Amino acid sequence: MRKLAVVVLTLAGLTACNNACQDTCKELASYAEECGYTVPDEQVDKCIDDFARGNTTPEERDHCKDFVDNVSDEWTCDEAAQYMGLESGGGGE
């Protein structure tokens, strides 16, 4: 039983939790899709990789935390699509 607990805790420690900037990637992709764009999984994965903890400062993550829930208020459809590396023409303002 003890070995099982060690394995479970080790596996839990290996799974990475996303930071607020990485969560913003997902929100931007979802918003772009609501606007009519198609967002490939690879684009979301690249964004998440770009904003890994080792690639961001605590200040950047705090900034993302302030805006992760307000993506549609802060970005236009075209801005979200452009940020996600999508071609224009999906629609939206």
Image (cartoon, grey):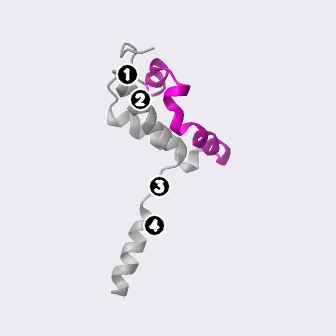
Instruction: Write down the residue under mark 4.
Output: 13
Give coordinates of residue 11: x percent, y percent: 39, 68
Q: Which residues are magenta?
A: 57-85
Query: Which residue matches tag 3?
Result: 17
Q: Nearer the viewer, residue 61 or 86?
A: 61
The answer to whether the residue labelled 3 contacts the one labelled 2, judged by CB atoms less than 8 Å apart, is no
Q: Residues within 10 Å of mark 1 (few under 14, many from 20)?
A: some
| Figure quadrant of the C terminus | top left
Q: Alpha carbon of mark 1 to alpha carbon of mark 3: how far?
A: 28 Å
SS of the residue at dot 2? helix
Secondary structure that dominates the magenta span: helix
Circle 2 sits on which residue?
A: 31
14 vs 24: above or below: below
Q: Is residue 33 left or right of residue 65?
A: left
User: Viewed as shown, does residue 10 lie left or right of 51?
Assistant: left
Spatial CA distance of label 3 from label 2 is 22 Å
| Tag 3: amino acid | Cys
Q: Confirm whether the magenta stretch covers residue 79.
A: yes
Q: Earlier in the sequence, mark 1 or mark 3?
A: 3
- Dividing the picture into quadrants, the one containing residue 14 is bottom left
What label does residue 64 carry, if any?
none
Q: Are marks 1 and 2 in contact (CB under 8 Å)?
A: yes
